[in-house]
Image (cartoon, rainbow, N blue to C red):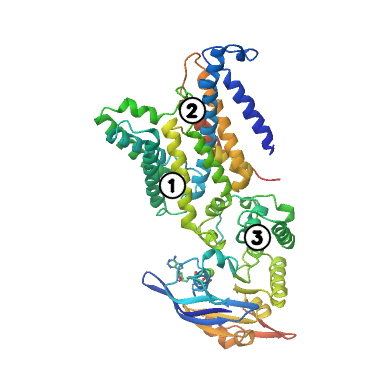
Amino acid sequence: MKNIGVAIVALFALSCFSLFVGVKEISISDWWQTPQNIDLFFISRIPRTLAVVLTGASLAVSGAVMQMLARNSFVEPSSVGTAQSAALGILLVTLLYPGSPLIVKMIVASITAMIGMAVFLAMISRLPVTSPLLVPLVGLIFSGIVEALTIFIAFQTEMLQFQGTWMSGEFSGILRGRYELLWLCGVLAILTYVVADQFTIIGMGKDASINLGLNYKQVVIVGLFILALSTSLVVVTIGMIPFVGLVVPNIARKLMGDNLRASLPWVAVLGALLVLVCDLIGRLVHFPYEIPVGTVLGVIGSFVFLYLLYARPAHAR
Amino acid sequence: MIEINGVSHSYGKSKILQNISLSIKESGITALIGPNGAGKSTLLSLMARLQPLQTGSISFDGQSVSQTPTRELAKTLAILRQDNALSSRMSLRDLVGFGRYPHHKGRPTAKDHKAVEEALDYFDLQDMSGRFIDEVSGGQKQRALVAMAFCQETKYLLLDEPLNNLDMYYARSLMKRLREIADTGKRSFVIVLHDINYAGAYANEIIALKDGTLAIHGTPQDVLETNALQTLYSMKITVTQHQDQLIALHHL
Ligand SMILES: Nc1ncnc2c1ncn2[C@@H]1O[C@H](COP(=O)(O)OP(=O)(O)OP(=O)(O)O)[C@@H](O)[C@H]1O
Ligand SMILES: [Mg+2]
């Protein structure tokens, strides 16, 4: 079961399958024979599948990192106000500098995401450690406030419809030229893997970190930086997607524990698989129409999460 | 050599430690004893830089804990805390392995793996090394945490009540092991102990704290003595002798 090769093969197979799902029917045997089909592949189908895989992996890895930084397994960037803060940043920059390039939006979104995360971490540092469920609750309230503020501003400035595209993520608009920023998420995920041990130690607590010679503050700041960047990259290109960062790291944790060095590859692959499956369901359930992936995940993710909350811990041996 | 100079500490208005100055010689076992709330854990956590010093200074071989980079200090000293509340879910082998982090910084070598295996062997953890820390008993968890601190292979090891949760077998074998290593002259241990008989049997010297002040700093003979114990613990304890070993009958 612990063979990640199997998971990678499954991801690859499913990705290939995803290439052949779409309004225009393309058969596996002759897709390369007409130039239109080849164009369709390289302009739409391949970018979409890559975007799904990169997004899923990035969301799951971000969730795992945030759970280490907050020392709580019930948080993820989109449930504690980080993604909402990024969306607020995008709205503000769009209002103040209409027509600014994507990269500027991205940078502003990262800054506001960073601020949102710092506020959240400052709030939870005052909570008693004995009640871990307070942490996600505070996060939910905080993200609710940021979201309400965003909607209020969007409403006042007649940007509501536009704002909706950042708020609920979907892949139907992904074409070549519109998803490439997500490769940066892949780079950030690899960077996370490189310093995985440091995040694992941070997850053991401040005293353990100092004892093992880590500069606690510095590692937390690096973590915040990675999280802010990858969250806002996903929000800018795809929009907000719930539950992936919550569910996937918790499954990996059950199986493999908290050692990120061992679990991160799984987290990334399972995250990609989950989003891919949900995207496929969204595309197939109501064919030829699409249900946004965020909606599908909202349903599936909440059930899986409830199961994880109530499932009895597996006892070794 | 550990040098503690004029260390005082307070939480809010309450003074926890008052002007503690002492020096601890190299290579040996130093027992830190005293009643509940005397300030033992506070002193140890200040020594291990887990909290910033308020007044005074502490240094290990001349390396001041407040000025030396924490990364350097992690190769000189390690601490096992008294309340080892660990929220991480980690296999015992991984946990013990993290004790090597200051040496390998995430890229373990054969030497690191060897140290981990030795520690697992020594603390009888091989059978359960794949189990998660939240799925073992209290004593097994304690052994894993001691093994982790051990694996860090620092010259100075500060252990806050390492015998907590251990049964008689593992308690004695841990103390014997520490004694053997101390006798090689390579490593020094400062151990908070509540059982003064362990302190008397295994320590070279004993430091006794009471109400945040240094009450006694001396040999086991100085401490295992009815009057000294009376002032420390406010109870009358008979001390007898078994062969050449002083025994306090504190449970009678
Ligand atoms: N975080 C804190 N805030 C306020 N007071 C504290 C704090 N931690 C410890 N104290 C107080 O400081 C005093 C010394 O505590 P410390 O933990 O050092 O005692 P100890 O000698 O280790 O006791 P024990 O044998 O029970 O472990 C106690 O009176 C305790 O109540
Ligand atoms: Mg204590």
**Residues marked 2 and 3, same chain:** no
Q: Cβ of disc 3 within 8 Å of ligand 1?
A: no
Q: Residue at x 51, y 66 (%)?
A: B69
Q: Secondary structure at mark 3?
A: helix
The reply, left or right, for residue A178 in relation to residue A187 is left
**Image quarter hosting the C terminus of chain B:** bottom right
Could you say which is closer to the camera, residue B65 or residue A105?
A105
Could you say which is closer to the camera, residue A178 or residue A6?
A178
Three-letter amino acid code at the position of disc 3: Gly
Contact check, label 1 and label 3, Cβ < 8 Å: no
**Image quarter hosting the N terminus of chain B:** bottom right
Q: Secondary structure at mark 1?
A: helix
- The chain that hosts pointer 1 is A
**Residues marked 1 and 3, same chain:** no
Could you say which is closer to the camera, residue A192 or residue A267?
A192
Work out whether residue B27 can be spotted. Answer: yes
Asked if A120 appears above or below A218 in the picture, the reply is: above
| Residue at numbered disc 1 | A135
In space, the residues marked 2 and 3 are separated at their CA atoms by: 43 Å
- The chain that hosts pointer 2 is A
Tag in front: 1 or 3: 1
Tag in front: 2 or 3: 2
In space, the residues marked 1 and 2 are separated at their CA atoms by: 23 Å
Three-letter amino acid code at the position of disc 1: Val
Q: Residue at x 70, y 66 (%)?
A: B170
Tell me the crowding category of disc 1: few under 14, some 14 to 19, or many 20 or more residues within 10 angstroms, Cα based.
many
Q: Position of residue A180 (x, y in %)?
A: 49, 31
Where, by quadrant of the figure, is residue B203 drawn? bottom right
Q: Position of residue A62 (x, y in %)?
A: 50, 41
| Residue at numbered disc 2 | A299
Q: Position of residue A151 (x, y in %)?
A: 31, 32
| Residue at numbered disc 3 | B139
